[in-house]
Image: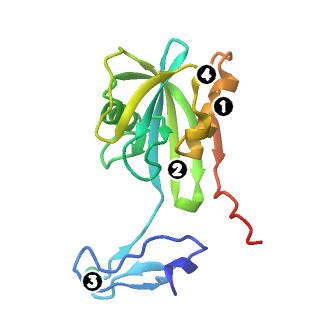
Amino acid sequence: MRPQDNGGIGIRPVNFCSNCGNKVVTRIPSGDDKPRFVCDDCGTIHYRNPLMVIGAIPEWGDKILLCKRAIEPRLGFWTLPAGFMELGESTGQAALRETLEEANARIELTGLYTMLSVPHVNQVHIFYRARLLDLDFGPGMESLEVALFAENEIPWDELAFRTVTTTLKHYYADRRQKPFPVHTGEVHAPPRPSKS
Ligand SMILES: [Zn+2]
């Protein structure tokens, strides 16, 4: 069975065992109901699970901080500071670290805001609201530019990811509410253009 047959989840296959180096096969282990990458030499089952992407909405007065991406995917598009959670850290630590890495900015988290499943890429995106602690920020390695935007300056057509767009739409709709509610939801693949 090909990994693509696994409920339609298109994940990059595991070819070799990270424990012993032998070739792995794809099959349903006993007691399981999904195909996994299995090493029949040492018995290791290489489970693949969704990845967490953690970010922040750094606020300064009525403005928020966005980063223009210097790397693919979506090079040249704007995003909230966010990235893959590292092993051994908490979600809050990941938000602080990503904001420091991408925008050289120090923040204080003020609350969980959105948690969005993105099943077609096997990710979960979490954004915190945050307070920017000072204006001493600037582009990190992964950013071309970092800037503060008022609501009427948000480059809606140049946002990098739909979870960022969704988060910012909630944010501006909720802004007058105290406290901000938490939003959970799903973002699915955009419809493919029809072949006509
Ligand atoms: Zn092995």
Q: Is residue 91 above or below residue 100?
A: below
Q: Residue furthest front?
A: 196
Instruction: Tell me which label, 1 or 3, sits earlier in the chain.
Output: 3
- Residue at 23%, 81% in the rendered image: 21
Query: Which residue is labeled 3 in the image?
Result: 42
Alpha-carbon span between mark 1 and mark 3 = 49 Å
> Residue 143: x and y, percent?
36, 38
Q: What residue is rendered at 43% in x and 47% in y? A: 75
Disc assigned to residue 151: 4
Q: Nearer the viewer, mark 4 or mark 1?
A: 4
Secondary element at tag 3: loop
Q: CA distance from mark 2 to mark 3?
A: 31 Å
Of callouts 2 and 4, the N-terminal one: 2
Residue for badge 1: 170
> Mark 3 to mark 4: distance in Å?
56 Å
The disc label shown at residue 104, or none: none
What is the secondary structure assignment of the residue under circle 1? helix
- Around disc 1, counting alpha carbons within 10 Å, would you say few (fewer than 14), some (14 to 19), or many (20 or more)? some
**What's the residue type where badge 3 is placed?**
Cys
User: In front of the other: label 3 or label 4?
Assistant: 4
Which residue was labeled with disc 2?
Answer: 124
Q: Amino acid at mark 1?
A: His
Crowd around label 4: few <14 · some 14–19 · many ≥20 (10 Å): few
- Work out whether residue 31 can be spotted: no
Q: Quadrant of residue 14?
A: bottom left
Which mark lies nearer to you, 2 or 4? 4
- Along the polypeptide, which appears first: circle 3 or circle 4? 3
Q: How far apart are the two marked residues, 4 and 1, measured between alpha carbons? A: 12 Å
- Return the disc, 1 or 2, that comes first in the chain's sequence: 2
Foreground mark, 2 or 3? 2
Seen from the viewer's position, the closer of residues 110 and 155 is 155
Q: Secondary structure at mark 4?
A: helix
